[in-house]
Structure formats: C-alpha cells, structure tokens
Image (tube, rainbow, N blue to C red):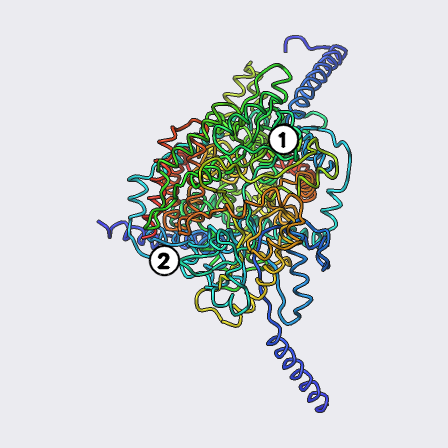
C-alpha cells in the first residue's frame, strides 16, 4: 500500500509530455528562490522547534534532556492554563474576527465612492495601522483607563453614566481589547476589500439595475459573490492572526486581570522565556500549529469547492 | 423606448440627476466626516501629547489640545545625532525587504496560481505551514543560525529572514487566480514567455494588491520589535524603532511626550508613504477595471 | 620600484604588528544593561554633579571609567527591560557579554545552570569587601553560599506620603512626621480617619505593589516563610492566608482603592502627585521624580514624606528588588577577563552613593553610613528599610514565584477566586514548575 502512491506519482512525472515537462521546470524555477529562503528561515526552525518540544530544554540551551512526548502528555493531561489560554484565544478570535471583517467591509463600501477628498478619508481610516503596538498600547491603556482618568469614561460621566473598569474587569477586558484591535488593524482589511470592490465590473451592477435590483439585492448577488476571493483571504488570515495574538494584549493588559486575557502565544512565551521551559513552549507552539493547519485546510477546501481549479 | 425625450428634457433630467448626486455626495461626505473624526481622536491625542510638557501631562493627561505648547519633546528626539543613522538603517531594511519580498513572492505566487507542475497543491500547503507558527516560537533557532554564520548585527540578519513570506504568497495567489485566463492565453499565443506574462501582465494588473502588500511589509519591517531587538544591538545597524525605544525608555515612567514625539518622528514618513501610494492604488485599480 | 614595495611591506608589517600589540594591551568589556540610552545627553559628560536619573548616572560613571582606563574600555549594549531577552539569546549563542545587570531574584536559575561566573574569590582579589554588604542586601547576589552577583542597590517598596492630607486627618505629630500605624487595627483606623477627613485613600497601589510585594512583606512580618527546608516554594500557608485576608480586608473596607493593573500603574502615580491620594505604596525609584515635580511647582503635592512599607505585624519585613551586576561568562571563563570585569563592577559599587540619588536603598554599610548618603533627601525617613528588606528565597523558582503569585493574588483581590483557592492554585503552579527542574 505504501509503495503505490509513490509509484503512481513517479509514473505521472514520466508521463508528462515534453511541453509539460518544460512547463513544470519553469514552475519549479519560479518558486525555487522563495522555497530556499522559506525552508531555511521558516520551515527548518519549525522542525527544530518540534525537535526541541521532545526535550526538556532551557532557553539558554542548558539542561537538554530527551523526554519523548512527555511535554504533550502534560499539556493535554493536566495543564489547566493551556486550556484556559486556548479559551481566551478563541474568545478573542470570535470577537475580533467578525468585527474586523464587518467593519472592514463597511468601511470599504463607504469609501468606494467617487466623492471629492476620498483619498483623505481612506488615509484616515488606514492611519491607525501605521502605529507600532507600543504606541497603541500606551494610547488605549489611557483611552480605556479606569475611573475618570480615561477618555471614554470621561465622556460617560459627562453624560451622567458610571465609569466602567474596562481593562480591570475580567468580563470587559477581552471585548475592550477586541475593540482596540479593530480600530488598529481594520485598515488593512479595508484596503483588501476596496481593491476587491474595484475589481467587480460596473457593467454587472448596471445590468442588475436594469433588471430592477434593489441595493440589498445588488449587495447580495453581485458585491458579496464578487468579494469571494478577498473574503476567503481575509477570513483565513484573520483566524491565523487572531490565534497568534500576543503583542497587543501584552501592552494593553499583560494578560490580566489575573490571567483572564492571557492568549496562547503569551503562555508559550511565558513558559519558554520566563520559566525557561523552551521545550514545553515549543510543544504549545506545535499543538497550535496542528490546530491552525487543520482549520485552515478545512476553510480552504470549503471555499475552493466548485472553483474548478 | 416608446417616446424619445427631447434634448431639453434630457438636459433637465441630467441636471436633476446631478443635483441628486451632489446631495448624496454631501450626505456621504458628512457621514464619513463624523466617523473619521471619532476614528482620529486617539491619533489626534498622540499628536497633542507630543507637543505638551511632561509635567502638564501628569496633571491632566486627557487633554486633546497641545496646551501649553512646547516643542521640547521633538528637540529631545532630534537632539540625537544617531537618529538620522537609525532612520537610514530602517529605510534600508524596510525597503530592501519589501522589494525583495515582492519580487520573490510574486514570482512564486504566479507559479502557484498559473503554472502546472507536479505536487503544486502539496507544495502550496507546505508553504502555508509557515503561516501557522508564531515567530515567538522560532526566533531562537533563527537567532542561533545567524550567530553561527557570524551575521548578527548585520543588514542581512535584519532583511533576509523576512523575505520569504507565506503571507505574501498566499495573498498574491488569491489575486492572481482572479485575473482572467483569456488575457494570459492571448499573450501566450502572441509568443510571450512565462516570465513575460508574469512581468508584463500579472505585475501591472496587480498593482493595487502589490501596493497594499508593500505597505504591509514595509510597516511590518519598520515596526518590528522582537527580532531586531536581539539581532541588531549595535547602534551602527540598529533600527529606529529599537533606537527610539531605548531613548525614551526610562525604567519606571511612561514619558508620554517624548514617546509620542518619537512615534510621530518614526511614523510620519510612513503616513507620507501611504499618501503617495494611495494614489497608486487608485490608478492601479483603474487600469485593471479598464481592461475588463 | 622594488624598494618602494619593500618599504610599503615594512610599513604594513609594522602597522599590523603595532595594531596587534595595541589590541593585546587594550581590552574591551561589553556591558549589557537596561536603564535606557542617553548617550546624546551624557555621552561626553564626566561630571556627576546634579545628575539624578538612572540612565544619566550609569552613563557618566561609565564615561569616567573609560577616561581613566584607556587600556580597559567598557562598551555598553542597551537592553530592553528586564534585560533577559537579549542576555538569554546571547548565552544560547555562546556569545555572552562580559557584564550584565539583572534583578537578584533571577540569579539562581542562571547560576544553577553554570551560566554565571562565581565571583566570591575574584571579589576578594579585586578588593570588594563582601562583609561590607548588609545582611539583607548580600542575599540578593548569593546562590548556595557563592556570590554570582554584586548587589548594587535595593529597589524597595515604600510608602510615599502626602503630609498635608495626613495633617487634615490629624495624623501628623509635633515634629511634622506622620503617625505611622504599627498594627493592622491601627492601619485601618488611620485609613478611616484619612478617608473621613479628605475622602481620599490612605494608600493607592498598582500592579505587583498591590499583590505579590505586599503579600510577601506581610508574610515575612507574620513570621511565615516562602520556602520549606528542602528549598521548595510554600505559598499555601496559614501566614499567607492571614496576609492575603488582610489585603482583602482593606479592599472591603474601601480604605485603599481598588488596585490598578501594572499598565495603568502610572495613574496611581499621577493621582498621588496631583494630591488625589494621601499615600502611594510603590518603589523607591519614584522619590527623585516626586521631589523634582514638587520643586518645579507643577503638582498639587507639596509636603512629601517617605516612610518604610507599613510594618504592622510582629517581625520587620519589606519587599525589595535589587539590581545586581554579574559576569555571565560561565564557570571556566578566562580569569584575566573576569578580573577586569569585576574591577569595573567594583568601580560602580564604590560609587553607588551617586546611584542613591535616584532614591534607591544602598547595599553597603560603608555607603549607608557615609555623610553623602545621609544628606540625601528623605533618607532619615525610611532608614529602617535597608534593615527590613528580605529577598525572595535564593532558589531557581524565584522569578517564577514572582509572576505566579502576582497573578493568583490579583485573582483574589478582584474576587475572581477565594483567597484559599488562589493560594492553592499558586502552590500547584509552583509545584508544577519544580517538576520541570528534575
């Protein structure tokens, strides 16, 4: 059984015609520069990470001892913090993901107009994206500061409402982080959707209007299907980025209050660098990877059905 | 088309439509302005803070106006003789990485999207693996690699690891797949080679997405923190993000004024960059829809 | 032509010999430290007068050293606080700096892995008198009886006090000193008086000052321990529970404000400067900042007093961290290099009284008793601090203890967990950490 697929694939290469072989050669030549760099700087470190995850391994490279899958056993067996970090991560993905997609699409639709000064508006909504995470952290720690020292709370109390302990309350903290995330990085999604919208031919809309389609119909039957590819792209990347969230949470709450917003990558980082357990941290990374990879494959499969690729 | 409207009637309709259009545009502009205003408050605040003295910030932080006004924070930032150097370093690192990434990744993406070769889908999934592992988990192996090559504290250390971006390939493959196959076939019939099709059809048609990607990569390189922190500790190759962080980092206080002045100093060129390329996006988009 | 080539050859030879000779003579020591980068302000300065910031002082001290030792130049690499990311990467790559600064509680794990150079003998050879360190301070540099770090300062948690607000509550004596509470009941009644008279909290706290720093100080004051005889961590103890319950009681009574997190800690500092709280429990490192703000007259705070951390139970106990200079060259480092590195550390230690201008406590009796130290502002007010300090146990789990206990105590303070559960969870996580050490 194990021999057959190999034989078939070899056979397949042999059966290529001369033109096909030439084509294949060109294809491989085109990806080769990328692939070499990719293997050296992305893939081998990942393999190395997996190797490290089978060890007790101090972050400074001392006390290295092979332990097989013990790190994984601990991880799945009794590490409550791993599961709670996973929970926080998924919660964040659930809040920020749809927020980023809906807001990004709404902004793109709004900014896809031929109006004077539209470039300025596009620049404004994109602008938060240029800030580094450190600056976003400093600013939003204050925008949502507790008591009446924060911006939002100052506004709330000026209209007679109680101030809200945004980041200091374990129920509010994650949604507040998600709001910050949307403000900070929705600009990129907006750009992608905007580019996608411009690709949809105006003639499709004109034809539909002749057929008497309303705004909603146009949106449902022309805009959304036309945005299929950018949408797939944004959803897949958003999920991956959300699951890997860390620096933003680090500067906003440090994972607090009381660890209630600690995401997986922060946990991985703590284990590897604060506790020196690089082996265990690498195991977390590898589990994350398997999880993300399966979900992404399902997503890609789901979206590419019937695309006739 | 039962009754043909007279020229006069047409003119009146046109005028009415234009009036409607203007009113609609005004409404849109007004709505966008309100949104944009709210959106800008945090940014305006960082700008105001950068022009306020630290002690007045301590007394009243949530003030949107730069009062009392001072330029001392910018004096502080610009007094450093090393800032031009760091700025140049960042520019070199970010530009070279962006350029090389765009070239190498778009070539690979074209191949993944259009050229048939064995195991194409498998290799593509293999590339996607790179997206799924956070950088925090791999920077120690990469660091050890550069250390063994004696290449720490060099531009290659800052530039090369970021070139092969699975993200870029993924993005470009998605967009290349959307380019009508007929365009390519016509060019091929005219005798264009694969590289010719890539260079003369795919790259020009993808200007918007390439620009978006360029901005994204450039920003990522410009704001990158963890990797340059460990890979470039020598002030000769240090990037401005790290250099400015060191300058404004006193261990115990936030130093709002100086930090914000530093952020604007480092960020302003990128805003400019975006402004310039924002126009390119629009013109790029017009090219592609014009062909359709 | 040939003569020219010959001459050139000789010249090149002479030059290369000359430079190698020079290279052999001059030694360059690399120092990896945080405290920031202020070369632009202090790059050429060799005069220490009037400089009170950490970054300024350490930069100028280095400049003076370099001026006086052309054969032993010190090159600074600025690290990101708390200095571990770059240090760990450098050690892993086998290219550690000659000298680094770290918090004392981080030393044991490095020392236990052989990453640090033992210093006791070198210190003696170079002339650092180990017996000059106060007992509490010496501890921060030790691991299993050997010095691996030279304790530079004591960055302690203290009580910043607004005397005007205390006076309003009738809590200032004839000498103009605050009447400091000496028991839990005392503390609560003082807090209630301040609250009744001014409507303001007697002490605001943020981040670790509200959690692990307070808790461990009270545990020590109650006579409890943080490690058992085998050196394993113990946090699920009766003393810890009593200490935690006291911390929670203050919350319930509303006499101290709900603590801010680490990131919003600046708010507590601003509140104190703006006269919106009667006290701030925070580090020594804020003292010179408040003094400067008062001198510039821009803040509501006028009469500023610095007290030791509240001493409320039977035994003295205060939390402090300590910046330590260490030599991360491993156990078999070149003795000449180590000696050179330690001689620079000695120079820093000998001049540590300058460092005290920041507000930090000092580690050497000779410095503490010096006139220059005693004349620094507020020193008499919190003199007992350097006697009361206690280090975290000198075990490999010292730093993990810090993060874990902070998080679990925060859970109790925010009523996410009961105090019993919080302490049990902290103990379980520490036990788990120990498992990885075997």
Q: Which residue is mark 2?
A: A63
Q: Is residue C291 above or below residue B32?
A: below
Q: In the shown orientation, is residue C421 left or right of residue A114?
A: left
x and y percentages locating residue B104 in the rendered image? 54, 51
Name the quadrant of the N terminus of chain C: bottom right
Dot 1 crowding, Cα within 10 Å, few <14, some 14–19, many 20+: some
x and y percentages locating residue C421 in the rendered image? 35, 31
Q: Is residue A309 above or below residue C331?
A: above
Dot 2 crowding, Cα within 10 Å, few <14, some 14–19, many 20+: some
Pick out the residue farthest to the bottom: C3
**Residue C284 showing in the rendered view:** yes
Question: In percent of the image, x 64 and y 72: which residue is there?
Answer: C71
**Number of callouts:** 2
Alpha carbons under labels 1 and 2: distance apart: 57 Å
Q: Nearer the viewer, mark 1 or mark 2?
A: 1
Q: Is residue C91 above or below residue A42?
A: below
Residue nearest the viewer, comparing A5 with B34: B34
Question: In percent of the image, x 68 and y 37: which residue is there?
Answer: B279
Q: Which residue is mark 1?
A: C172
**Residue B116 showing in the rendered view:** no
Q: Secondary structure at mark 1?
A: loop
Mark 2 chain:
A
Which numbered disc covers residue C119? none
x and y percentages locating residue C345 in the rendered image? 57, 62
Residue nearest the viewer, comparing A194 with C295: C295
Q: Is residue A208 above or below residue C339?
A: above
x and y percentages locating residue C30 in the rendered image? 58, 63
Mark 1 chain:
C
Pick out the residue farthest to the front: C174
Q: In the shown orientation, is residue B1 left or right of residue B105?
A: right
């Amino acid at each position: 059984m194990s021999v057959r697929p190999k034989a078939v694939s070899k056979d397949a290469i042999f059966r290529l015609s001369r033109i096909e072989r030439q084509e294949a050669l060109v294809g491989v030549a085109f990806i080769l520069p990328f692939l070499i760099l990719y293997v050296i700087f992305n893939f081998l470190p990942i393999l190395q990470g997996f190797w490290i995850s089978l060890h007790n391994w101090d972050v400074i490279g001392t006390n290295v001892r092979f332990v097989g899958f013990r790190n994984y056993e601990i991880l799945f067996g009794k590490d409550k913090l791993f599961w709670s970090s996973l929970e926080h991560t998924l919660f964040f993905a659930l809040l920020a993901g749809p927020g980023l997609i809906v807001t990004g699409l709404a902004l793109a639709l709004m900014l896809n107009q031929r109006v004077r000064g539209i470039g300025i508006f596009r620049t404004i909504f994109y602008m938060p994206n240029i800030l580094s995470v450190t600056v976003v952290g400093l600013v939003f720690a204050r925008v949502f500061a507790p008591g009446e020292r924060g911006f939002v709370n100052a506004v709330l109390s000026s209209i007679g409402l109680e101030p809200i302990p945004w980041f200091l309350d374990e129920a509010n903290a994650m949604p507040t982080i998600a709001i910050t995330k949307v403000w900070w990085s929705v600009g990129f999604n907006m750009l992608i959707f905007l580019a996608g919208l411009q690709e949809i031919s105006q003639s499709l809309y004109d034809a539909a209007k002749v057929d008497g389609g309303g705004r909603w119909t146009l949106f449902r039957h022309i805009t959304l299907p036309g945005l299929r590819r950018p949408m797939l792209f944004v959803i897949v990347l958003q999920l991956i980025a959300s699951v890997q969230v860390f620096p933003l949470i680090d500067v906003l709450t440090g994972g607090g209050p009381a660890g209630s917003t600690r995401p997986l990558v922060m946990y991985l980082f703590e284990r590897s660098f604060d506790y020196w357990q690089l082996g265990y941290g690498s195991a977390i990374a590898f589990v994350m990877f398997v999880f993300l990879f399966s979900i992404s494959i399902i997503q890609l499969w789901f979206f590419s059905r019937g695309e006739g690729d | 088309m039962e009754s043909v409207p007279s020229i006069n009637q047409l003119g009146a309709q046109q005028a009415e439509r234009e009036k409607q259009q203007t009113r609609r545009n005004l409404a849109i502009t007004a709505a966008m302005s309100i949104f944009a205003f709210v959106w800008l408050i945090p940014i305006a605040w960082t700008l105001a803070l950068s022009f306020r003295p630290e002690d007045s910030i301590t007394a009243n932080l949530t003030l949107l106006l730069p009062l009392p006004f001072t330029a001392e924070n910018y004096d502080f930032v610009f007094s450093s003789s090393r800032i031009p150097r760091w700025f140049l370093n960042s520019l070199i690192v970010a530009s070279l990485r962006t350029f090389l990434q765009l070239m190498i990744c778009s070539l690979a993406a074209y191949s993944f999207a259009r050229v048939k070769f064995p195991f194409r889908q498998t290799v593509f999934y293999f590339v996607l693996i790179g997206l799924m592992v956070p950088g925090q988990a791999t920077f120690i192996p990469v660091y050890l690699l550069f250390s063994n090559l004696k290449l720490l504290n060099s531009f290659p250390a800052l530039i090369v690891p970021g070139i092969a971006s699975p993200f870029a390939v993924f993005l470009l493959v998605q967009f290349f797949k959307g380019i009508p196959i007929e365009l390519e076939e016509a060019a091929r019939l005219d005798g264009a080679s694969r590289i010719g099709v890539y260079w003369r059809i795919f790259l020009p048609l993808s200007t918007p997405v390439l620009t978006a990607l360029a901005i994204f990569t450039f920003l990522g390189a410009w704001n990158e923190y963890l990797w340059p922190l460990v890979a470039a500790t020598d002030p000769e190759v240090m990037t401005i993000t790290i250099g400015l962080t060191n300058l404004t980092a006193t261990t115990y206080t936030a130093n709002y004024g100086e930090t914000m002045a530093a952020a604007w100093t480092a960020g302003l060129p990128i805003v400019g960059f975006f402004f310039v390329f924002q126009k390119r996006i629009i013109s790029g988009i017009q090219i592609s829809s014009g062909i359709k | 032509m040939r003569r020219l080539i010959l001459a050139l050859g000789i010249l090149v030879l002479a030059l290369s010999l000359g430079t190698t000779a020079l290279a052999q003579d001059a030694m360059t020591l690399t120092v990896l430290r945080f405290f920031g980068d202020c070369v632009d302000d202090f790059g050429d300065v060799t005069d220490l007068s009037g400089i009170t910031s950490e970054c300024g002082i350490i930069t100028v001290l280095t400049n003076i050293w370099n001026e006086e030792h052309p054969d032993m130049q010190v090159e600074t690499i600025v690290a990101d606080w708390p200095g571990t990311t770059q240090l760990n990467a450098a050690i892993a790559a086998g290219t550690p700096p000659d000298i680094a600064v770290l918090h004392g509680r981080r030393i044991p794990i490095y020392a236990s892995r052989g990453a640090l150079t033992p210093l006791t003998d070198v210190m003696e050879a170079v002339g650092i008198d180990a017996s000059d360190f106060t007992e509490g301070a010496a501890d921060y540099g030790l691991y299993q009886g050997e010095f691996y770090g030279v304790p530079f300062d004591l960055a302690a948690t203290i009580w910043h006090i607004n005397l005007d607000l205390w006076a309003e509550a009738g809590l200032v004596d004839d000498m103009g000193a605050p009447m400091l509470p000496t028991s839990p009941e005392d503390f609560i009644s003082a807090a209630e008086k301040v609250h009744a008279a001014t409507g303001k909290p007697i002490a605001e706290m943020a981040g670790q000052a509200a959690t692990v720093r307070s808790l461990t100080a009270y545990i020590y004051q109650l006579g409890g321990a943080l490690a058992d005889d085998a050196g394993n961590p113990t946090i699920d103890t009766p003393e810890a529970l009593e200490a935690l319950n006291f911390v929670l009681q203050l919350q319930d009574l509303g006499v101290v404000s709900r603590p801010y997190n680490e990131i919003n800690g600046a708010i507590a500092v601003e509140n104190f400067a703006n006269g919106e709280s009667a006290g701030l429990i925070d580090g020594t490192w804020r003292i010179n900042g408040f003094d400067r703000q008062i001198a510039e007259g821009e803040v509501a705070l006028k009469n500023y007093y610095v007290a030791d951390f509240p001493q409320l139970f039977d035994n003295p106990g205060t939390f402090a961290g300590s910046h330590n200079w260490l030599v991360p060259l491993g156990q078999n480092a070149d003795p000449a290099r180590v000696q050179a590195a330690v001689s620079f550390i000695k120079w820093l230690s000998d001049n540590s009284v300058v460092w005290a201008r920041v507000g930090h406590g000092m580690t050497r009796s000779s410095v503490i008793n010096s006139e220059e130290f005693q004349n620094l502002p507020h020193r008499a007010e919190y003199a007992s601090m350097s006697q009361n300090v206690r280090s975290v146990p000198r075990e490999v789990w010292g730093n993990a203890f810090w993060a874990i206990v902070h998080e679990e105590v925060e859970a109790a303070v925010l009523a996410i967990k009961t105090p019993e559960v919080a302490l049990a969870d902290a103990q379980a996580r520490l036990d788990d950490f120990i498992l990885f050490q075997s």
